[in-house]
Image (tube, rainbow, N blue to C red):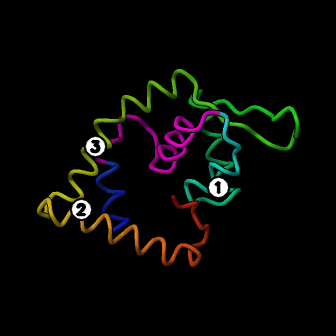
Amino acid sequence: MHQIYLSIYAEECSTFKVTSVQHAIMAVVHENPGLEQGRVALEVGVDRTTMADVTRRLEKRGLIERSHDPSDRRTRRLHLTQAGLDTLQGMGPAIERVHARLVEPLPTSLREALSATLIRLIAAHNEDGRVPMRLG
């Protein structure tokens, strides 16, 4: 299922040159400006090494800014730049198309049931993942 999602994502979002993980990070940072980089990693479900690499690339492209926390210089706080916000907002319709295409074969009633079932499965097996996500 993940590979199918990534294929549809690539078709719909290729013009933005933003991977699905980069998009997820940007979305979390948009919803939580100034969130610590390690917390963003937990929200997205990536390890710290991957997170550091991805945020470095996003910063290099001018889509996010990383700043040191004044109370702990080891801590990096993340913010979207205006270019990052513009990109994220521009991707909105493409992301909606990705999600619509993924569930298109299902009748509406099953789409809701699928979402509820997936949330339940993720919650039950979250600790089994490589990087448990913060749920809720």
In this view, the mark in front (3 or 2):
2
Find out whether residue 12 is within the magenta segment: yes
**What segment is highlighted magenta in the picture?**
11-33
The residue indicated by pointer 2 is 112
Amino acid type indicated by mark 1: Thr
Rounded to the nearest angstrom, the CA distance separating label 3 from label 1 is: 26 Å
Mark 3 or mark 2, which has the lower sequence index?
Answer: 3
The residue indicated by pointer 3 is 96
Q: Position of residue 67 (x, y in %)?
A: 75, 31
The residue indicated by pointer 1 is 50
Residue at the image position 64 percent from the left and 55 percent from the top: 50
Q: Position of residue 117 (x, y in %)?
A: 33, 72
Amino acid type indicated by mark 2: Glu
Rounded to the nearest angstrom, the CA distance separating label 2 from label 1 is: 32 Å
Q: Tag 1, which secondary structure?
A: helix
Asked whether 120 or 47 is in front, the reply is 120
Rounded to the nearest angstrom, the CA distance separating label 3 from label 2 is: 16 Å
Amino acid type indicated by mark 3: Glu
Q: Tag 2, which secondary structure?
A: helix
Q: Quadrant of residue 33?
A: top right
Instruction: Using the image, tell me which numbered label, if any, was put on residue 37.
Output: none
Mark 2 packing: few (<14 Cα in 10 Å), some, or many (20+)? Answer: few
Left or right side of 18 for 81: right
